[in-house]
Image (cartoon, rainbow, N blue to C red):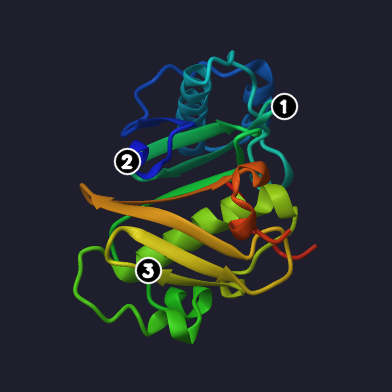
Amino acid sequence: MIGALLPPGVAWAERFADDVPEALFPQEQQAIAQAVPKRRREFATGRWCARRALHRLGLPSVPILPGERGAPGWPPGVVGSITHCPGYRGAVVARAGAFLTVGVDAEVDEPLPDGVLEAVSLPAERSQLDRPGPPSWDRLLFSAKESIYKAWFPVARRWLDFTEAQVTLHDDGTFTADVLVDGPLRAVGGRWLSSGGLLLTAVAIPAPAYFPPASRPAPPRRGRPAQ
């Protein structure tokens, strides 16, 4: 599914169940040793997906350890993102020379719990959600913001609040966002997909050298885990 949202040059892998061997490196096993079994399974499947995606770039298997705010520690010269939700695990990677950053998110296609939408959105964003579904537009908005955050954090190295990016969802399977604080990204675009009871969103931003000059992008708080 996730491959339909990604441009050439971004490699990916996905699974719909934790049905792969828990082939973790010793360092990864140590990092997850205190986690509950469910978290261990999704962690192992996510790393399996990440290594499969790295192989598609012609790169070897390496440990991918949780770093700052839980963001995966990719090998030098690689950018990437991992996501998981009930019924889905996926990872995307790209060479840093071609892409500045990538971010992906998966969610179950169902409405957000009561009270969550108001906490993660701006009034202008909520005004666009009154349209027939599927998808669950509020959950899709949440997912788009998660993808943006996962793309933002590795280059900004700082938290981006849900209310610091204003997202517009488009019916054609795309979304756009204005980042409302200073940082390395100002305008962000991405793609979304609703299929099989799942929502997927993806952001893939080419490296600055790959932007035409006219479209070149402008160059500790509480936090949620990045992946």
Q: Which of the two discs, 1 and 2, labels the residue nearer the N terminus? A: 2
Above or below, comparing residue 66 to residue 50 in the picture: below
Q: Quadrant of the N terminus?
A: top left
* Residue 11 in picture, x, y percent from top left: 46, 29
Q: Secondary structure at mark 1?
A: loop
For mark 1, does the 10 Å Cα neighbourhood hold few (<14), some (14 to 19), or many (20 or more) residues?
few
For marks 1 and 3, give the CA distance. 34 Å
Identify the residue position indicated by label 1 in the image: 76
Residue 16 in the figure: left or right of residue 84 = left
For marks 2 and 3, give the CA distance. 18 Å
In this orientation, which residue lies closer to the viewer: 177 or 150? 177
Q: Secondary structure at mark 3?
A: strand
Identify the residue position indicated by label 2 in the image: 4
Q: Which residue shows up at 45% across the image and 27% down it?
A: 49
Instruction: Give amino acid for label 3.
Output: Leu
Q: Quadrant of the C terminus?
A: top right
Above or below, comparing residue 7 to residue 11 in the picture: below
Identify the residue position indicated by label 3 in the image: 169
Quadrant of the image occupied by residue 117: bottom left
For marks 1 and 2, give the CA distance. 26 Å
Q: Which of the two discs, 2 and 3, labels the residue nearer the N terminus? A: 2
* Residue 64 in picture, x, y percent from top left: 63, 27
For mark 3, does the 10 Å Cα neighbourhood hold few (<14), some (14 to 19), or many (20 or more) residues?
many
In this orientation, which residue lies closer to the viewer: 122 or 43? 122
Check residue 149 in the rendering and tell me which mark sits there, or answer none: none
* Residue 47 in picture, x, y percent from top left: 52, 27
Direction front: furthest residue: 213
Q: Which residue shows up at 39% across the image and 54% down it?
A: 191
Q: Which residue shows up at 47% across the image and 43% down it?
A: 83
Above or below, comparing residue 221 to residue 78 in the picture: below
Residue 184 in the figure: left or right of residue 143 = right
Q: Secondary structure at mark 2?
A: helix
